[in-house]
Amino acid sequence: MATPKQSFLSRFQSFGRLSSGQKLAVIFGTAAFFAFVFVAWIYVNKPQWRVLYSNLNNRDGGNIINALSQLNVPYKMAEGGSAILVPSNDVYNTRLKLASKGLPRGSVVGFELLDNQKLGTSDFIEQVDYQRALEGELDRTISSISAVSAARVQLAIPRPSVFVSEQESPSASVLVSLYPGRTLGAGQVAGIERLIAASVPQLEAKNVTVVDQNGEVLSQPQGTSDGVNLNADQLDYVGQVEQALANRIQAIIAPIVGRNNVRAAVTADLDFSRMEQTAETFQPNGTPGTAAILSQQKKESTSTTPAPGGVVGSAANQPPGQSVSTAASSSGGTTPLNGTATTAGTVSTNSSLMPVHSRKSSTTNYDVDKTIQHSVQPAGSIKRLSVAVVVNYRPVVNRDGSTKLVPLNQSEMDEINKLVKGAMGFDPKRGDSLNIVNTAFSTKPVVALPHTPFYKNPDNIAIAEEVLKDLLTAGVVLIVFLSLRRMLYEMLAKAPKPVPQAAAPSFEAAAPRQREGYEQNLQAAKDLARQNPSIVANVVKDWMENE
């Protein structure tokens, strides 16, 4: 039995017996097979192109293409050059690398606009370029928020004036384009307003207006309301008060009935009006002993008038306190100041004979008893509370192990009522209302979401498509290979067989048969010569060559 190696060699040696047309067919068929295998390999390993960036302007497109060439990332253009495609395996990695280089920059420009300032530029052009650059930088900053896909900022900066009365405050408007399904919270909107206000001199956050792509106003002046509706801060405060009271009620009732057996809802009516009041009250003055003395003044004066007498003349008509001495005193004493002098000698007056006049006055100023009271009523005070509490029935285990829900008794409900009133700060003067209901909670089974079969999972479908594509390609290659192999074998099988070269051994093998009989050997030789005359000729030829 021939081995596979000998069979292959014999078939390969049979290739030389094919005709020229058959040889060309075998060669072209083999070349076509390898070409088909090469094309199939390229098709299987063909990259799946995905969009890297779309809606690009010419500047960003050129910068991205240069960056991709430096990174050795294959790419191709689509949508008239406004979109760039790269292999799907390189999309995210390429985006990160381009982002590190600041690409794409978008249609807006930032402070790089000021890099190429020309000599002789007017102040107006410089101011316009600076405003454009500031708007571009704010666009990029706001676009970096996770929920914002694109942003557009427009600043209205008035020209400065030397007159204070003519100075105007700047304002800004922001248009944000949000990703599908995304929203901006009140805190994020306030953050955008403060960010822009901090970037522009003399710009206040209340002068910043934020609008989304649908034209809805997202911003609202802080701390103000229109008198009818509450602003965002006030609504948040109301929600916080209601949630805090509900949590407080559930926390105090949960240890009694169980954490999942109580629900509480609170509606708070808050007063956000702000009122300041100053009162000045005057009280009647008290007794002098208890009154507060503000100031006190006392005056006291004493005067004397001399009696008429003495010598008639000029001396007697002198004012008091003066004396006229006309002769030396015999005693040599001095004249008193208030004495009366005479011409005959010293005239003295007796003070005891003069009338004395005294005058006293006292002024006392008492402080006014008054009270000044300044009161400020804080905004957000509670006007009224409405609380609703639902308590589940108490579960009771029967003797057979089953569970039964039993309503709470009246004493337990009274205790819960007292606890809730204490937790909420119940005030009947305010008109607060409280409603506690004891009922059985719904025990409907939770319907689980249907599990997605593995064959409907998008990831598994993508993997199956890749595997199926590879298997189909391998199957087609195998079919082509087997068809070509079968055709080649059929062609080799139809090729003429070579003349056996074992004539000499066959003739020599017939020599021992002479022992059996000359006739048999002669007949065998005749038959051999008659069937294969070429073998006999070759044998004779060999004999002659050997001789």
Image: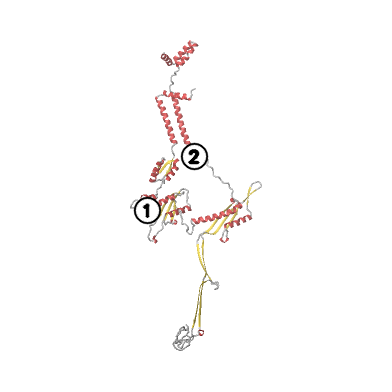
Judged from the image, the secondary structure of the residue bearing numbered disc 1 is helix
- Callout 1 amino acid: Val
Q: Which residue is mark 2?
A: 461
Relative to 141, say whether 31 is above or below.
Answer: above
Q: Which image quadrant: the C terminus?
A: top left
What residue is disc 1 on? 128
SS of the residue under disc 2: helix
Of circles 1 and 2, the one toward us is 1
Q: Earlier in the sequence, mark 1 or mark 2?
A: 1
Percent of width and height locating residue 258: 60, 51
Residue 368: x percent and y percent? Answer: 51, 71
Front-most of residues 537 and 336: 336
What residue type is disc 2 on? Ile
Report the residue at 55% width, 55% height from top: 244
Q: How is the image coloured?
A: secondary structure
Residue at x 34% of width, y 54% of height: 122
Residue 210, horizontal then vertical, whole percent: 44, 53
Q: CA distance from mark 1 to mark 2?
A: 55 Å
